[in-house]
Image (cartoon, rainbow, N blue to C red):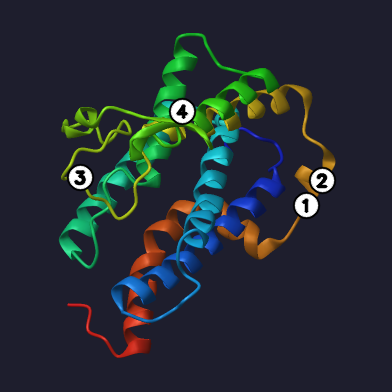
Amino acid sequence: MAGMKQRLRLFDILRGVSVVSMMGFHATYDLVYIFGMDIPWFQTPFIDIWRASISWTFLFIAGVMCSFSRSNFRRSGRYLAVALLIWIATTVAAVDTPINFGIIFCMGACTLIYAALQKLGFAPRGWGFATAFLALFLILFGLPHGYLGIGPWTFPLPHTLYQATGLAWLGIPGPHFASGDYYPVLPFLFMYLTGASLGALWKKTGYPEPVRKATFPPLEFVGRHPLAFYILHQPVILVLCAAATGTRLF
């Protein structure tokens, strides 16, 4: 949130809540899928809802913060560099499926696209854009799974489209693609742009006092350092889970 005279503490708190929730999710995932613990409630659709509550919040807030960044190009570069390091680390460690095009990649790619739009003189702002982008997000949500639409109004996409390689980053995974955390550009760009549109509007009109004055220092601290917690939490959780279950990781 560079360039602000006063932090928007509510967003730090919300981001902190999401980081803590993410750590809880990954700890539960590791116990079930890596260490073989039986946790009956950790299954679909609860898993999907929990995961979405975390990642959608990250993307929305990252979009809101675009308006306060001195350089969204540099910001995207940091995200993408971290995403590359995560891919290398998870590939070398081979504890679980390596992370290809995960949430940090998605935030970097979306920030890069937004920076390019800014450079071209198009920075969406307002409820109209936000509503349109949210609708596109919902319509395209099934793209990585082979369909478009919402609820009963869905239709399948050609199977041959998903036989191609090299399009997983976009949202069209090929037959051999696998990732431990998958957030392609589509549909998630549109959740990001929903946040960016509202962030640009709120910066112009001003934020309510509660957004600036809300405070909960522990969560604010976590919310101010989300990348650090993202990078460090999984190795720590793996070590703790291995110690608790008496399991060797390597």
- Residue 222 is situated, as x and y percent measured from the top left of the image, at 56, 59
Callout 4 secondary element:
helix
Residue at numbered disc 3:
177
Residue at numbered disc 2:
210
Residue at numbered disc 4:
72
Callout 2 secondary element:
helix
- Neighbourhood count class around disc 3 (C-alpha, 10 Å): few under 14, some 14–19, many 20 upward: few
Q: Amino acid at mark 4?
A: Asn
What number of labels is visible?
4
- Report the Cα–Cα distance between label 2 and label 1: 5 Å
Q: Nearer the viewer, mark 1 or mark 3?
A: 3
Residue at numbered disc 1:
214
Question: Residue drawn 41% across and 23% down?
Answer: 113
Question: Residue drawn 46% across and 16% down?
Answer: 117
- Report the Cα–Cα distance between label 4 and label 3: 30 Å
Q: Residue furthest right?
A: 209
Does the image show residue 225?
A: no
Q: Which is nearer the eye, 105 or 158?
A: 158
- Report the Cα–Cα distance between label 3 and label 2: 44 Å
Disc on the earlier residue, 4 or 2: 4
Vertical comparison of 227 with 73: above or below:
below
- Report the Cα–Cα distance between label 4 and label 1: 26 Å
Disc on the earlier residue, 3 or 2: 3
Q: Nearer the viewer, mark 4 or mark 2?
A: 2
- Residue 64 is situated, as x and y percent measured from the top left of the image, at 60, 34
